[in-house]
Image (cartoon, grey):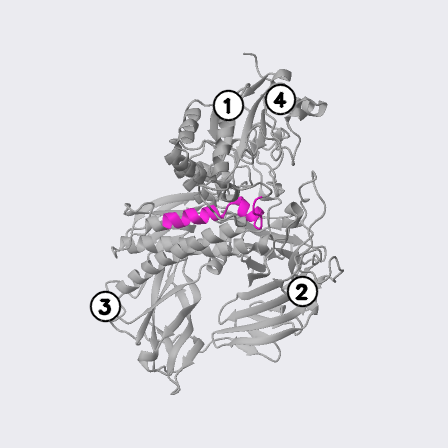
């Protein structure tokens, strides 16, 4: 056979975790069958099947004959599986650990069902960032590709004129890859179809990419909407391949087969794209980012549960909950489906579900499925965590030298020691007959304590109460014992000061002045330097801005003109929720203005530089949608519509640092994303670290302010229905810092933001464990995961990542024997040890 003009592969994207919830597992079986039918077509077209891993598991159970056929075609090389994540997430929008779990659990599931792992990492939906080469290598992939396609959002990978590259990741890992090129097609809505190839423009593109080697043409489709011969929705025309074969000498290959041909070729260029090289448009702000916010909470619980389950099992305390955690992670990974994010308020997109579905998911919106699965995951995770913590607390010797009537064993799931404010939960106290409680450490020394709530009997004795107290240095992945005394002595003093009349909150670290009109932070001073990070020359933070869409159903008058929102100008009512001595909280409530209510709660804790700012938005009207369209379908890259929180530093910002999954990079773009934090730095490197709860899209405005997108509505743009939350909650931490703040400190601030200490209160009892212990401590790297890989395993898996970009010698201290490791810059490494 003569050398082909080009190679071609057909790629089919579908999913059960997402559209299959509405259109049924039947649509997934149809999608696989249509893919295999194309291999039987004339010409025989090889299809890369891109479904979530859970689909293959369910199809094997309910369509065993189809699974046998799929395995046969895979063995014959007539089709391939590409992608292989468990739940097809938007990879840039979830944590590094979730990225890796998606790959590992996906590969494990597919290998179990189909007898072989996935060779090529290529997802239709966005999952492309600088750590993908390393992550895919760790998960056992041989090859990768950036040739994703655009649906409601855009993957944004840079388009290249090289048909094959070595994709080099942040740590230096290289994967032989097919990049995004002009030869990637996704008809009918996003690009032209392959008939473009025999136009003059198409022939010129083929010639350009054929300079050094034969290129690969990739065509994406979505089998599952209808049978292969149907053209009403997908508009797939198999006869185009016959015409193509008549006009060109084309060879049909899988992506793996194509890259097998290229792996020995010399002079393959190396490309190392950074985050700013990707021009993405993802569902930032959709659903008010509440799914991202809740997802962070769920993942924190699951990671903590894994850590303490492993510890409790290693201590032989009768805990073995790996199966429950495995299922909880699967539920969580399914909830990260791209359809949950992109199409949160969508039900079916015009196609009818089966009338008697094999798996009835009740035809809900895709976002509601995501919340349901996350609810199930977090419920299971909390139950495992509770069992493990109570088992460990019960083994601690809290009786000898007990300094109070009750013991409080406080657990820190983070992989570093840290100070923290600890809350006890509501304690039932009637049987103790006490009027007051004070918390002290294991030596009997009082620690700063605050009563958060209390109920008393007529005689003044406590019926129940919730306490907060300060822990100066909770051990890394460990615990510390405190006691509750009923006859407290002198209270411990704190550095917290409040001036309610002047709306001033301060401690030894910072001074916070609130705006008397809107209640936001008007002035923030770093007391170590005397420098103002925010001042009264700008809008207070947070200020909500944006324009309402009065075409929405809840508008009083359709299409009426309303002034743009600007909460800096509306008068708030102030409520002092807590006034110390350990923590102060003040709430500013804005009444309804043009169908919107707004609320700000500012919190400052004794001894902490962190200013905690929470906001809630009660929007009867969604923001306006962007009206401009690309290809008659997509939004332009720049997001201009939506509701925004605005912040303006009182200094010139020279550098913007932000994180992405397992990495940190600066951004020079006017619009950028930050996975969990951004750091606004002045010329000398000092600045303001901003940690957020899931609102990842930021714009740098000409006046020096930064706007954070918090709510966007695009359902009406695509389906004609409106989808947005009527109530949405947000949280930020503002931390001033001097020059020299490390990436480690930034990552730890974000980890502490997501991970609260856990407190178990119990009567003092004898036990074998000491009153204070760290089970695992890491120096020189960040702890990503600590878990037992299976219910039968006595070993623990420890996952670390290097976070400074400099490489490091790592020392891990644990209760068995110390470990050491050497990590490259940004390297992720797995180690094994015994508790």
Q: Mark 1 — residue? A: 39
The earlier-in-sequence mark between 4 and 3 is: 4
Report the magenta residues as a range.
325-348
Q: Mark 2 — residue? A: 595
Q: Mark 3 — residue? A: 766
Q: Residues within 10 Å of mark 4 (few under 14, many from 20)?
A: some
In-front residue for pair 383/475: 383
In-front residue for pair 81/417: 81
Q: Residue furthest top?
A: 1
Q: Mark 4 — residue? A: 210
- What whole-number distance in Å separates the C-alpha atoms at marks 2 and 1? 56 Å
**Tag in front: 2 or 4:** 2
Q: Residues within 10 Å of mark 2 (few under 14, many from 20)?
A: some
Q: Where, by quadrant of the figure, is residue 196 drawn?
A: top right
The earlier-in-sequence mark between 2 and 4 is: 4
Q: Residues within 10 Å of mark 1 (few under 14, many from 20)?
A: some
- What whole-number distance in Å separates the C-alpha atoms at marks 4 and 1? 26 Å
Q: Position of residue 403 (x, y in %)?
A: 30, 75
Q: Secondary structure at mark 1?
A: helix
Q: Secondary structure at mark 2?
A: loop
The earlier-in-sequence mark between 2 and 1 is: 1
């Amino acid at each position: 056979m003569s050398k082909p003009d080009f190679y071609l592969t057909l790629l089919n994207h579908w999913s059960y975790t997402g559209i299959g919830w509405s259109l049924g597992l039947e649509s997934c079986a149809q999608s696989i069958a249509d893919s295999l039918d194309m291999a039987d077509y004339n010409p025989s077209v090889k299809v890369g099947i891109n479904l979530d891993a859970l689909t293959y598991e369910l199809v094997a159970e309910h369509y065993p004959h189809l699974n046998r056929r799929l395995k046969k075609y895979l063995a014959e090389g007539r089709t391939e599986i590409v992608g292989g994540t468990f739940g097809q997430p938007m990879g840039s929008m979830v944590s590094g650990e979730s990225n890796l779990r998606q790959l590992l659990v996906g590969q494990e599931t597919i290998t179990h069902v189909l007898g072989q792992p996935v060779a090529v990492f290529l997802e239709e939906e966005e999952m492309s960032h600088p750590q993908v080469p390393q992550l895919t290598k760790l998960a056992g992939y041989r090859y990768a590709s950036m040739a994703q396609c655009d649906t409601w959002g855009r993957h944004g990978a840079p388009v290249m004129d090289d048909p094959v590259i070595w994709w080099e990741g942040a740590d230096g890992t290289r994967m032989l890859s097919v990049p995004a090129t002009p030869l990637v097609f996704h008809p009918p809505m996003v690009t032209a179809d392959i008939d473009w190839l025999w136009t003059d423009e198409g022939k010129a593109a083929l010639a350009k990419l054929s300079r050094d080697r034969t290129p690969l043409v990739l065509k994406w489709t979505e089998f599952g909407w209808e049978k292969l011969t149907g053209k009403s929705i997908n508009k797939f025309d198999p006869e185009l391949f016959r015409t193509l074969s008549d006009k060109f000498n084309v060879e049909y290959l899988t992506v793996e087969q194509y890259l097998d041909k290229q792996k020995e070729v010399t002079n393959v260029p190396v490309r190392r794209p950074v985050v700013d090289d990707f021009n993405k448009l993802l569902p930032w702000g959709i659903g008010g980012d509440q799914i991202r916010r809740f997802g962070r909470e769920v993942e924190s619980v699951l990671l903590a549960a894994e850590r303490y389950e492993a510890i409790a099992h290693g201590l032989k305390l009768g805990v073995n909950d790996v199966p429950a955690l495995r299922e909880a992670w699967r539920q969580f990974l399914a909830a990260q489906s791209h359809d949950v994010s992109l199409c949160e308020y969508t039900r079916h997109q015009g196609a009818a579900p089966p009338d008697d579905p094999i798996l009835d998911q009740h035809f809900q919106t895709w976002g509601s499925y995501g919340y349901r699965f996350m609810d199930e995951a977090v419920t299971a995770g909390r139950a495992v965590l509770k069992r493990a913590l109570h088992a460990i607390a019960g083994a601690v010797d809290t009786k000898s030298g007990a300094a109070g009537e009750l013991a409080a064993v406080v657990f820190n799931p983070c992989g570093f020691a840290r100070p923290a404010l600890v809350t006890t939960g509501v304690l039932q106290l009637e049987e103790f007959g006490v009027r007051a409680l004070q918390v002290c450490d294991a030596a009997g020394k009082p620690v700063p304590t605050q009563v958060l709530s209390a109920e008393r009997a007529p005689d003044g004795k406590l019926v129940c109460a919730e306490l907060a107290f300060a822990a100066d240095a909770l051990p890394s992945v460990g615990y510390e014992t405190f006691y509750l005394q009923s006859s407290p002595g002198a209270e411990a003093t704190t550095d917290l000061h409040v001036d309610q009349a002047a709306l001033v909150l301060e401690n030894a670290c910072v001074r916070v002045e609130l705006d008397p009109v809107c209640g936001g932070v008007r002035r923030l001073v770093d007391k170590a330097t005397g420098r103002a990070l925010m001042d009264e020359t700008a809008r207070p933070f947070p200020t909500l801005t944006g324009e309402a869409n009065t075409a929405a159903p809840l508008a009083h008058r359709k299409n009426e003109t309303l002034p743009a929102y600007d909460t800096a100008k509306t008068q708030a009512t102030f409520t002092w929720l807590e006034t110390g001595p350990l923590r102060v909280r003040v709430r500013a409530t804005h009444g309804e203005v043009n169908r919107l209510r707004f609320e700000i709660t500012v919190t400052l804790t004794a001894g902490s530089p962190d200013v905690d700012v929470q906001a809630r938005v009660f929007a009867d009207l969604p923001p306006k949608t962007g009206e401009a369209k690309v290809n008659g379908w997509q939004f332009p890259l720049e997001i201009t519509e939506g509701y925004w929180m605005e912040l303006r530093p009182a200094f010139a910002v020279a550098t913007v640092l932000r994180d992405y999954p397992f990495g940190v990079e600066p951004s020079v773009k006017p619009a950028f994303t930050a996975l969990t934090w951004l750091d606004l730095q002045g010329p000398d490197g000092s600045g303001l670290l901003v940690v957020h709860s899931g609102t990842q899209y930021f714009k740098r405005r000409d006046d020096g302010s930064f706007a954070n997108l918090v709510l966007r509505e695009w359902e009406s743009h695509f389906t004609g229905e409106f989808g947005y939350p009527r109530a949405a909650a947000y949280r930020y931490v503002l931390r001033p810092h001097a020059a020299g703040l490390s990436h480690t400190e930034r990552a730890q601030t974000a980890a502490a933001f997501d991970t609260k200490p856990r407190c178990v209160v119990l009567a003092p009892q004898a036990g074998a464990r000491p009153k204070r212990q760290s089970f695992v401590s890491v120096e020189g790297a960040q702890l990503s995961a600590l878990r037992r890989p299976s219910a039968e395993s006595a070993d623990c898996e420890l996952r670390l990542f290097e976070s400074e970009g400099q490489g490091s010698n790592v020392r891990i201290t644990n209760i068995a024997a110390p470990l050491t490791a050497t990590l490259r810059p940004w390297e992720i490494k797995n180690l094994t040890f015994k508790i």
